[in-house]
Image (cartoon, rainbow, N blue to C red):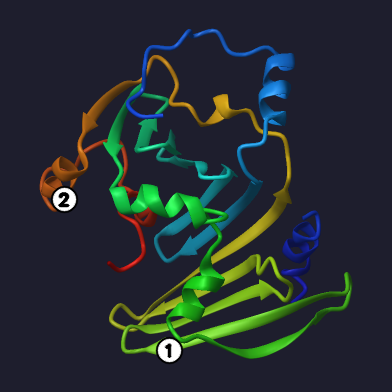
Amino acid sequence: MGALALFAAAALDAPPSVAKERDEKKPTAAEASESGARTRGETWYTTTVARHDRGVMVVNYWSKGPLFRAETILSGHRISSVINGDRYYIFDSVLGTGLSIERSKRAVAEDVGRGRPFGTEWQEIVDKGGEVIRGGEVPSIGLDYELYQVTNEEGRKQVLVTANELRLPLRVETFVRSAGETSTVEYTGWQRGLAISDFFFEPPAGIDFEELTYEQYVRSVGGIPRGPAPVFYSHLLHGSKED
């Protein structure tokens, strides 16, 4: 548990339509502060480090109510995913290209009660029948944790979370039986209630976006790849609840 103490300590600090033309001038510090102070929802930030046999990926996440942004570096390209209203944006800031997809009506409707749009592994594993297999305390900081596990024909998944009402994930380990591979995701730097301007969740000017309706995107799945990167957060595009 020693390596996890850093993640747990950080945890204590603790889901507009088509883009319009925008003035390329960024807001002043005062304007950003004022915008950030206007509460549209609870704000969150964290970083994940995902490790797999094929490599390591670091992702930064921000949210403000249903507004969402995630950024990572893939082969030297800064790839961003942004959720704003009824659009799901994916863009490459290095090439200046992107994809703007209309979100499903289900996904948009779920924004109302979604809560934090990322770091939801605890709810997901509980929904799949996961149960606590171990609990305890990180002695160095006095933080309680719980370890959940679910095993099925696909493999095994373990989710380590804080044992409080926030249920912040600290570490996720997934074993895929068919491939015989294990991957891990570690969360660090959890922050809650930081000031974030709404401007941060707007797709930037200067990006050449290809625009698709939801139906066009669904029909294209499995065909020619669209956009600079895949849809990493499918529940925010398609929705997660059954009809």
- Residue at 77% of width from left, 55% of height from top? 14
Residue 30 location, x and y as percent? 74, 15
- Residue at 56% of width from left, 60% of height from top? 119
* Mark with earlier residue (2, 1): 1
Residue 149 location, x and y as percent? 53, 85
- Residue 207 drawn above or below residue 146: above
- Name the side, left or right, on which 121 lies relative to 227: right
- Residue 207 drawn above or below residue 74: above
Task: Residue type at mark 1: give it.
Answer: Thr
- Residue 131 drawn above or below residue 53: below
Query: From the image, which quarter does the C terminus lie in?
Result: bottom left
Q: Secondary structure under badge 1? A: strand
Q: Is residue 129 visible?
A: yes
On residue 125, the disc is none
Q: Residues within 10 Å of mark 1 (few under 14, many from 20)?
A: some
Residue 126 location, x and y as percent? 51, 80
On residue 151, the disc is 1
Taking depth in this image into account, of 140 and 115 the one nearest to the observer is 115
- Residue 54: image quadrant is bottom left
- Name the side, left or right, on which 119 lies relative to 11: left
Distance Cα–Cα, label 2 vs label 1: 29 Å
On residue 221, the disc is 2
Residue 178 location, x and y as percent? 28, 81
Q: Secondary structure under badge 2? A: loop
Query: From the image, which quarter does the N terminus lie in?
Result: bottom right
- Name the side, left or right, on which 54 lies relative to 163: left
Task: Residue type at mark 2: give it.
Answer: Val
Taking depth in this image into account, of 204 and 186 the one nearest to the observer is 204
Residue situated furthest bottom in the rendering = 133
